[in-house]
Amino acid sequence: MPKTIAILTSGGDSPGMNAAIRAVTMVATAKGHRVLGVRQGYKGLLEGKFVPIAADEVADILREGGTILHTARCQRFLDVAQRDHARDLLTQQGVDGLIVIGGNGSLAGLSLLSDPDEAKNWPVRCIGIPASIDNDIALTGLAIGVDTAMNTIVEACDRIADTASAHDRTFIIEVMGRDCGYLAMTSAIASGANMVLFPEAERTEEELVNAVVKSILTVRERHRENQKVVAIKSEGVSTTTERLKSLVDAKLSEATGQDHDDIETRVTVLGHVVRGGRPTAFDRLLGSRFGNVAVRAILAGEHRKMIAWMPPMDLPEGVGTRSAADPYCYIVDLPAVLAATKELLEGQSPLARWRATAFDDLEDVFLL
Ligand code: F6P
């Protein structure tokens, strides 16, 4: 009997998920195994939404954004009885291996599903693939979708910069990223923004306002031809973008003694635009790499692991190994990923500390 590998996408979709689904299907099929898709993530799993996937059905999907399997957020999965039900359904379908493509919450769900204390001797091999535009998953350099999201933000910022320049206006552009400032930080550099506001810096509301006002006044004082200011703000910053704008306007009036209309600020919230669209070549490649390595990891008997791409710092001792199938990929312990992700999000890991201070010395450079 060929082995059956089930696959699902969970949480917020990210461009490149389809490339991973395609790679899993093609590699598993080539090795003589059956692939079973689960529609709508853990929610669909609990509802028994299984669909066989054939290699010819996925041949062209890698250029599409979103996920052909659809996705969902599923609070019910936090309930142990629901997870028992999920394990039973997978067993009834003859599943030997499960691949979950998703972000922090989805990987946490996979960790619970495969927890040896809870799952007892449940034999299904479980492997996670990191996919989230937020890039808030530890022990991998990038997750699927980050590169496409960054490119989308940069393209939007380039367009806004044109109109900001033409009107000598200030724009505060809010980008997704949940509690992680990665997308804001990297897209600020790549788009040539004048400043970036991100949660890791832990600025008070007053400090945020002062920083934006200082940037605007510094640019104005230069008396150069171009007086535009582009500030990128991560959605994770606790002050809402609209509130920040009105506080900035008030402070500008106070600082200049003029009506703030003289120095115009505008706000653009990019929202879900950032999450959609065709994946970049990089995300197609990353999804394909992860799918290939994930199938081979299952066939090699790996369990409770996440596939990673070039970790940003040295992997802690003993938590992972380099993949034999792809020298840029690593196979790391799922519980170690979740523990390191918690530290990252709480600002305690070396990477989080670096992110918090990375822009301190750059603030003045951005205004030159
Ligand atoms: O995690 C991906 C993400 O797009 C975050 O950047 C954002 O905060 C969140 O999902 C939005 O979720 P939803 O689409 O469920 O509103």
Image: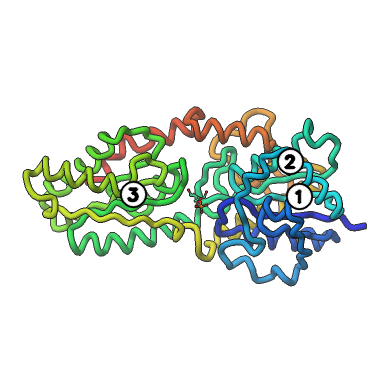
User: Label 2 sits on what residue type?
Assistant: Leu
Q: Are marks 2 and 3 in contact (CB under 8 Å)?
A: no
Seen as rendered, the residue at the extreme left is 257
**Residue 338 pos. (x, y %):** 62, 35
Seen as rendered, the residue at the extreme right is 1
Packing grade of label 2 (10 A; few <14, some 14-19, many >=20) is many
Which mark sits nearer the N-terminus, 2 or 3?
2
Which residue shows up at 65% across the image and 54% down it? 9
Disc number for residue 98:
1
Q: Are marks 1 and 3 in contact (CB under 8 Å)?
A: no
Above or below, comparing residue 86 to residue 284 in the picture: above
Quarter of the image where one finds residue 227: bottom left
**Residue 211 pos. (x, y %):** 25, 39
Disc number for residue 232:
3
The Cα atoms of the two marked residues, 2 and 3, are separated by 38 Å
Above or below, comparing residue 275 to residue 346 in the picture: below
User: Label 3 sits on what residue type?
Assistant: Ile
Look at discs 2 and 1 and give the one toward the viewer.
Answer: 2
Q: Which residue is mark 2?
A: 113
Above or below, comparing residue 50 to residue 123 in the picture: below
User: Label 1 sits on what residue type?
Assistant: Leu
Q: Along the line of sight, which residue is nearer the eye, 139 or 164?
A: 164
Which mark sits nearer the N-terminus, 2 or 1?
1
The Cα atoms of the two marked residues, 2 and 1, are separated by 10 Å
**Residue 205 pos. (x, y %):** 29, 36
Which residue shows up at 40% across the image and 38% down it? 199
Look at discs 2 and 3 and give the one toward the viewer.
Answer: 2
Packing grade of label 3 (10 A; few <14, some 14-19, many >=20) is many
Q: Is residue 38 left or right of residue 274?
A: right
Disc number for residue 243:
none
Which residue shows up at 83% across the image and 47% down it? 88
Q: Is residue 4 left or right of residue 25?
A: right
